[in-house]
Amino acid sequence: MCTYTTERVDLSGSAKGPNGWFTATTASVYYDHPVHAPAGHTLNIDVLAPKLGPSARVALELSADSARALASAIVAALGAVPSDLLE
Amino acid sequence: MLGDLTAQTLEIGSGDSDRIEAYAASPGGEQSRGGVVVIHHMPGYDRGSKEMTRRLADLGYDAVCPNLYSRQAPGAEPDDASAAVRAQGGITDQQLVDDVAGAAAYLRSLPHSNGKVGVIGHCSGGRQSVLAACRIDLDAAVDCYGAYVTGQVPPDWPLKVGPLYDDLPNLSCPLLGLFGDDDSHPSPDQVQELAELLERHTKDFDYTSYAGAGHGFFAVDRPSYRVDAAVEGWRRIEAFYGRHLRGA
C-alpha cells in the first residue's frame, strides 16, 4: 500500500542531482512503493532543496536490509571520527 | 478501426479558477460514449497511469487523468513531483475532489459525451475514487485496493487522510471493488466492513477479493502483479463500465 508515513529531517550539506551540485536542506525518508527498484516496497530517501524546485532531488530506493546496513555504516563512519574533527 | 485513439496532454479546470495539467485519451469514431476519470496513485502521474488512460480509450471511453500534483510541482517529472508533494504533506481531500470534478466536467463537455462519467483509482487512488463518488455526482466508481475507506488510520501518520465512514451514505453511484485476499491495507475484514456498511446504506456495491493476490496485483511492473487476478479484474471493470456508462 501507499504507506503515507514520512520522516523528515533538516539537512546541512550538499547533494549532486541531475543539474549538478546543490545545497540540500531537507530529506524525506519513507517506506513505500519504489519508482525503479524491482520490489513492492523500498526504503526511500529523497534529499531535497525545496526552494530550488522538485527537480533538486537525489533519490534512493533501498531494500530494507540494505537501508539498515547503510544507516549502520553512517553511524559507524561517524563513530570512527576523532571527536575534534566533528563539526 | 478497433484500437484507434488519440491521446494528448492538455489543461482542464479545477475548482473555481484553477487550471491543471491532465492526460486525455479518446477513441476514434463518432459514437456517443461515456467517460472515465483515472486517479493516479500516490507515486504520481506516471507512465502506468497514462497507459491505463489509453486502455480505457481503447475500451471505448473518453478518459482523462488529472495531474493531482499540478499545483505543487508544475512541469516536474512524475517521481520528482510525487517526492515534492510527499515532503509537503500530500494533497488534501478537497483538492482531489476539485480535480476529479474538473475532470468530469471536461469529459461531459466533449462532443461525443453521453453525459455519463465513471472514476477509477488504485491504491491511494482507490480510496480517492470512493471519496470522489461520495462528493460528486458520478455514474460508476471503481476502487482497486484502496486503503482506509474503512478502518482506522494510525494516529501518528502525518498525512491527514481518514476513513470515509461519514461520506459513504452519500455514495452517488454503483461501486465496483477489486481486492486481494492477501492484502492487509485494506484487509479482508475492512473490505467486509465496507460491504456491510454499503448494504446498510442500500448502495450498489459489487466486489471481489482474489485468492493468491495482495496489494497492487494490477501493477504489471511490480512483483505484486498477479496475472489471473489482473486479467479477471480488467474483465470485471469492462463489464461494470459497460453496464453503467454506455448508452445514449
Image (cartoon, helix red, strand yellow):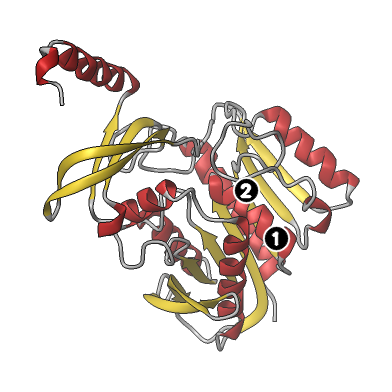
In the image, is residue A66 above or below residue B80? above
Q: Which residue is painted at 74% across and 59% down in the image?
A: B134
| Label 1 secondary element | helix
Q: Amino acid at mark 1?
A: Ala
Would you name the residue on which mark 1 appears? Answer: B133
Q: Is residue A76 left or right of residue B89?
A: left
Q: Is residue B71 left or right of residue B92?
A: left
Taking the image as drawn, is residue B229 in sight?
yes
Would you name the residue on which mark 2 appears? Answer: B127
Q: Which residue is painted at 69% across and 76% down in the image?
A: B247
**Residue extending furthest front?**
A84
- In percent of width and height, residue B102 lies at 58, 74
- In percent of width and height, residue B66 lies at 48, 67
Q: Residues within 10 Å of mark 2 (few under 14, many from 20)?
A: many
Nearer-N-terminus badge (1/2): 2
- In percent of width and height, residue A76 lies at 19, 12
Q: Is residue A4 left or right of residue A60?
A: right
Q: Residues within 10 Å of mark 1 (few under 14, many from 20)?
A: many
Q: Amino acid at mark 2?
A: Arg
